[in-house]
Amino acid sequence: MKQVFKLELAEARAMVAGAIGKANAIQVPETVCICDEGGYPLALERMDGARVTGPQIAWNKAFTAACHKRSTHLFNTPPNGPALPGNEAFGIQWSFEGRFAVFVGGFPIVVDGAVVGGIGLSGGNGEQDIACGLAGLAALRDLLGPAGHRVVVEADIKR
């Protein structure tokens, strides 16, 4: 039997607060979704002024990052992004009724070496979504670090 670390609502809310704090600082209206390891939302927040399409896009990114254990932009990063034309996963974005996201803004949540969920962001450009995503991951690191847990805070995560 294996013990598993589970992401809970308090951690998800801390991540949302961290991501939205960064979004406010850089003045970009974001939508943030935190999901569990199965891709189901624990927390979803759309800032005032953020696009109406943001919640679905943020959820898709969080789903993809959690369930496929990799940052979403790595799927189409040249030259070896697996979703690029001619590569092994070309067309994967049409999987799961179109829920599979292969562009910037989704990051797996890795705690103590295990993927426990995903964070997805929608509303900014690629750099802005990355900055807000990293702020969300850093908020979790700051919350769990004192208890001795290690949280990956990187843009290019592949597990």
Image: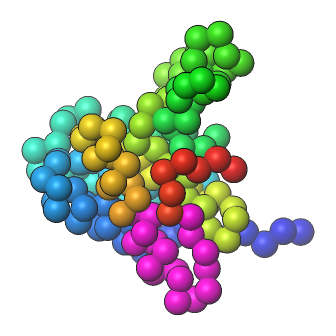
What x and y, as percent, mark residue 58? Answer: 37, 42
Compared to residue 4, the image places residue 105 above or below, namely above
Which quadrant holds the N terminus? Answer: bottom right
In the displayed image of the protein, which residue is found farthest to the right? 1
Q: Please tell me in which quadrant of the rendered image residue 117 appears.
A: bottom right
Residue at x-position 33% and y-position 54%: 131
Q: Nearer the viewer, residue 75 or 12?
A: 75
Q: Is residue 71 visible?
A: yes
Q: Please tell me in which quadrant of the rendered image residue 51 appears.
A: top left
Q: Is residue 95 visible?
A: no
Q: Is residue 60 left or right of residue 54?
A: right
Q: Which residues are magenta?
A: 136-152
Residue at x-position 46% and y-position 72%: 140
In the displayed image of the protein, which residue is found farthest to the bottom? 146
Residue at x-position 39% and y-position 54%: 133
What x and y, as percent, mark residue 36? Answer: 55, 56
Compared to residue 43, the image places residue 30 above or below, namely above
What x and y, as percent, mark residue 138? Answer: 42, 69
Is residue 150 found inside the magenta-colored segment of the image?
Answer: yes
What x and y, as percent, mark residue 68? Answer: 64, 40
